[in-house]
Image: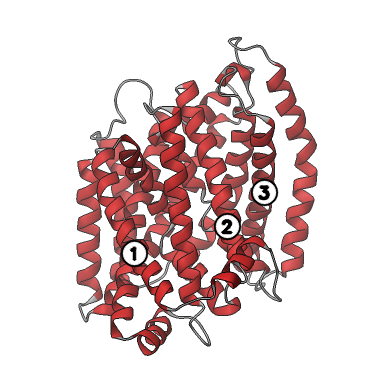
């Protein structure tokens, strides 16, 4: 029972990364390349698990969540205020933009199965998410979202099962990486839509008061199940012939499997949108608390500051939903900010879990963990630089940069930062446990 409750609790993170963006990206990858990009989702699940485990272990071992650790690391530095504003800006602005997409995605799911007006559905979804966030208890939020994620998973996996994919082909695509022509951006998108920066702050904040073994089990099961659901979405998307839209996918499934399949798709899309519409404001509020909590209880769950953060993000999403407009400029800005934050958070995590002064000996990274984290951090740097470059091109009206330019810039940046990061890791591992940390 304890392990089951742990899985339900950590399913908040699965609910966070399987939103309309993931559904759209995975289904588009399936529509464009069949099952050939399953390996990218497999890698993204591994990367998500590695980074989330490190963020949660940091909190359990040190008593500080990721936001607090970043704040303390830069305390007294000239750049401290800039760093705090950068982190908060990326989380708040990015989540506000994503919140609009989450609510619009949930509305689109309802629209596939009913004729209710969009404004009414938007208000209902906003009220449901706001009520859940107002209650504020992590266990209550986890229980409701775990049920939502379960409904989403059943919907997409059942649809994928009835499509009768070739399991040998799926296994080959999962284990043998390939890059079909024109798939480079989709591969980056599949990883980037799963390894999202705000999930690291949310996972770290949720780990307070948890046990290490319980966290690892619950987190692993929840993230892997979430990855399987994402793979099911990709398989479902492979049924579409021609340009991908939700309507085209619903029509294709209805023709191949019957009218009930469109209903399952509608349920899955609504569940993905609603669950992420709840976790995005929650992640922003948890991050703001970690950055600005001063021990006086002004950022507890029921405090007005805490509620103001999640309430503001929820209202932005509802506002864009009522206007039925996709917030393209905000999303471009969010891409740039999150592009900066993701490699920053990944590099900081790599340094933190190798710091004897912070974690002691027992929770310190081992060789295998360091190898995995180094690889994931390198991918985060590539993703981050690609996001910033794409946003810069779009903002300048220069179109979309080529795949070669994006990958080349990302690899060059990895080479540039590899040696300084390796030296910093070595210094932290050579420190004596219990001594004061270097500011």
Rendered view: 325 above or below 42: below
- Measured in 3D between alpha carbons, the distance from the residue under mark 3 to the one under mark 2, in whole angstroms, is 19 Å
| Residue 82 figure quarter | top right
Calculate the distance from the C-alpha at mark 2 to the C-alpha at mark 1: 19 Å
Q: Residue furthest top?
A: 435
Residue beneath disc 1: 154
Q: Which residue is mark 3?
A: 381
Task: Decide if residue 202 is in sight here.
Answer: no
Q: Earlier in the sequence, mark 2 or mark 1?
A: 2
Q: Quadrant of the N terminus?
A: top left
Say left or right for 173 vs 219: right
Q: Residue at x 47, y 62 (%)?
A: 230
> Where is residue 3 shown, x and y percent of the image?
35, 38
Say whether disc 3 or disc 1 marks the residue closer to the N-terminus.
Answer: 1
The front one of 399 and 385 is: 385
Residue 283 at least partly seen: yes
**In the image shown, does 28 or 333 lie closer to the viewer?**
28
Q: Secondary structure at mark 3?
A: helix
Where is residue 54 shown, x and y percent of the image? 54, 35
Q: Which mark is residue 292?
A: none
- Dot 2 crowding, Cα within 10 Å, few <14, some 14–19, many 20+: many
Q: Nearer the viewer, mark 3 or mark 2?
A: 2
Taking the view exactly as shown, the residue that stands out farthest to the front is 168
Q: Earlier in the sequence, mark 3 or mark 2?
A: 2
Q: Position of residue 154 (x, y in %)?
A: 34, 64
Q: Secondary structure at mark 1?
A: helix
Q: Is residue 4 above or below residue 167?
A: above
Q: Are marks 3 and 2 in contact (CB under 8 Å)?
A: no
Query: Which residue matches tag 2?
Result: 42
Quadrant of residue 428 in the image? top right
- For the residues carrying marks 3 and 1, which lies nearer the camera in this image? 1
SS for callout 2 = helix
């Amino acid at each position: 029972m304890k392990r089951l409750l742990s899985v339900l609790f950590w399913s908040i993170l699965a609910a966070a990364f399987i939103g309309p963006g993931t559904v759209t990206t995975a289904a588009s990858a399936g529509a464009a390349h069949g099952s050939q990009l399953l390996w990218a989702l497999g890698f993204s699940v591994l990367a998500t698990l590695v980074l989330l485990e490190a963020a949660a272990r940091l909190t359990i071992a040190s008593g500080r969540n990721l936001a607090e650790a970043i704040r303390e690391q830069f305390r007294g530095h000239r750049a401290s205020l800039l760093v705090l504003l950068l982190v908060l800006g990326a989380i708040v602005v990015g989540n506000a933009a994503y919140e609009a997409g989450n609510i619009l995605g949930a509305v689109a799911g309802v629209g596939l199965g009913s004729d209710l007006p969009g404004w009414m559905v938007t208000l209902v979804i906003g009220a449901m998410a706001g009520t859940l966030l107002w209650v504020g208890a992590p266990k209550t939020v986890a229980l409701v979202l775990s049920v939502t994620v379960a409904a989403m998973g059943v919907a997409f996996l059942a649809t994928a099962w009835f499509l009768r994919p070739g399991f040998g082909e799926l296994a080959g695509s999962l284990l043998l990486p390939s890059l079909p022509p024109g798939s480079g951006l989709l591969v980056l998108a599949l990883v980037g839509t799963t390894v999202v920066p705000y999930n690291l702050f949310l996972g770290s904040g949720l780990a307070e008061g948890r046990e290490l073994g319980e966290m690892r089990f619950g987190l692993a099961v929840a993230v892997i199940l979430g990855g399987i659901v994402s793979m099911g979405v990709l398989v479902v998307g492979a049924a579409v012939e021609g340009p991908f839209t939700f309507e085209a996918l619903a029509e294709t499934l209805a023709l191949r499997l019957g009218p009930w399949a469109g209903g399952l798709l509608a349920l899955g899309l609504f569940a993905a949108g609603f669950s992420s519409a709840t976790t995005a404001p929650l992640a922003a509020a948890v991050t703001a608390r970690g950055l600005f909590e001063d021990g006086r209880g002004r950022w507890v769950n029921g405090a007005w500051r805490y509620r103001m953060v999640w309430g503001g993000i929820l209202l932005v999403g509802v506002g864009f939903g009522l206007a039925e407009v996709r917030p393209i400029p905000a999303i471009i800005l969010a891409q740039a900010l999150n592009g900066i934050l993701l490699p920053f958070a990944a590099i900081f995590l790599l340094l933190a879990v190798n710091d004897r002064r912070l974690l002691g000996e027992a929770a310190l990274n081992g060789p295998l963990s360091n190898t995995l984290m180094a690889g994931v951090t390198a991918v985060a740097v590539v993703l981050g630089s690609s996001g910033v470059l794409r946003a810069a091109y779009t903002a300048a009206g220069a179109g979309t940069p080529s795949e070669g330019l994006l990958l080349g810039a990302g690899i060059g940046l990895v080479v540039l930062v590899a040696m300084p990061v390796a030296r910093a890791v070595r210094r932290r591992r050579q420190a004596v446990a219990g001594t004061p940390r270097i500011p």
